[in-house]
Image (cartoon, helix red, strand yellow):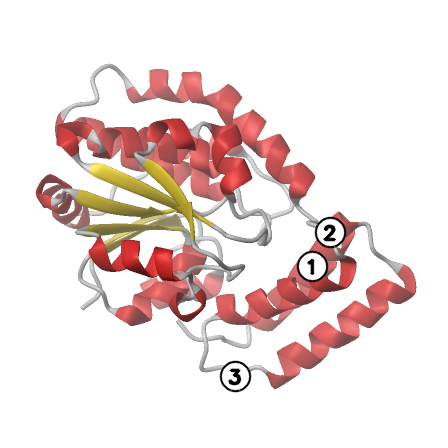
Amino acid sequence: MKTELECLPCFFRQVSRTLAYAGVNGEQGWEITRKAERIIEGASFDQAPARISTMLHRLIRQSTRVDPYQNVKAAYNRIALDQLPGLRRMMGPGADGPAGLAAAVRAAIAGNIIDFGIYDRIDLAGSLAEAFQLPLPQPAFRQFSDAVAAARNILYLCDNAGEVVFDRVLIESLRQGGRKVTAVVKGVPVINDATMEDARAAGLTESADCVIDNGNDGIGTLLELCSAAFREAYRDADLIISKGQANFETLAPERDGRTFFLFKVKCPVVAGALGKQEGDIVLQGPCR
């Protein structure tokens, strides 16, 4: 993934949206926006959009000294928890076998709609219904199912607050057969990405064998910025499940044969790179 001209308006929308969530306008808002313009102007188009977004959100957080998305994260953890019983009914009885795993994958991907780095409004119920109607990519799912069956130590890279409630469904399915699942959240708040506080609020700490943070505020997973503890867990995993577009942007270039990407396509640049339509669900096998 590389930055395209189409990404530039999105960067500015992210800045404007985040300042609004931070309650910042007037002269302070103009000053931060001018600094953001200089970051965008000096950025290389050869890098993933998530790397540029990381710098922009770091600027806003450091300038305002607030977590702009704290309230919306807490709200969507509660909203997702309210949706969870209905989701389990939608999945139907029995969590064993390929059918149960497929339903759990669909549930986890549906939750990826909770992304305030891109959207202003979220139709979570609609996303859940849609995820159970859209075709699950084949033969990628068969590859994924085989990889799960062979794995014993799974690293699960989480994305957004609220979304982690639905990740619980897939993680519980993955843990069948004695597999260990380590869930990973952000070390520092950025956009509405899940942190350890969100993991506890969403019940993720009860579903995974353990939850760790990656030690940084990067959007996606910027391996060179991650903590030594995270890099050790990453190195030791048999299977890596990577949730969200930003993780795809930052980890696809690693071409790690252990990694599967799960997300919803939410922008035209990613859609074009994958030959997909916006709104499609993605389960993509290892990049080699």
Residue sitting at x 36%, y 67%: 273
Q: CA distance from mark 3 to mark 2?
A: 28 Å
Task: Kindly indicate the quadrant of the structure image that contains residue 62.
Answer: bottom right
**Sequence order check, earlier mark of 3 and 1:** 3
Q: Which residue is mark 3?
A: 44
In the rendering, at what x and y percent does residue 257 appear? 18, 62
Identify the secondary structure beneath mark 2.
Answer: loop
Q: Residue 98 sits in which quadrant?
A: top left
Few, some or many C-alpha atoms within 10 Å of disc 3 (few <14, some 14-19, many ≥20)? some
Q: Are marks 1 and 2 in contact (CB under 8 Å)?
A: yes
User: For the residue marked with disc 2, what is the amino acid?
Assistant: Val
Q: Does the CB distance between marks 3 and 2 fall below 8 Å?
A: no
As drawn, 115 above or below 198: below
Can residue 172 be spotted in the picture? yes
The residue lying at 20 percent from left, 17 percent from top is: 94
Relative side of 274 to 43, left or right:
left
Q: Of helix, strand and loop, which one carries label 1?
A: helix
Q: Is residue 286 above or below residue 178?
A: below
Q: Is 32 in front, or is 262?
A: 32
Pointer 2 residue: 66
Judging by the rendered image, the residue that carries numbered circle 1 is 61
Of circles 3 and 1, the one toward us is: 1
Q: Residue placed farthest to the right in the image?
A: 27
- Whether residue 132 is visible: no
- Under mark 1, the amino acid is Arg
Cα gap from disc 3 to disc 1, whole angstroms: 22 Å
**Mark 1 or mark 2: which comes first in sequence?**
1
* Residue 117: image location, x then y, percent: 58, 53
**Amino acid type at mark 3:** Ser
Left-right relation of 35 to 182 = right
At which x and y percent is residue 53?
A: 57, 66
| Residue at position x 27%, y 17% in the image | 92
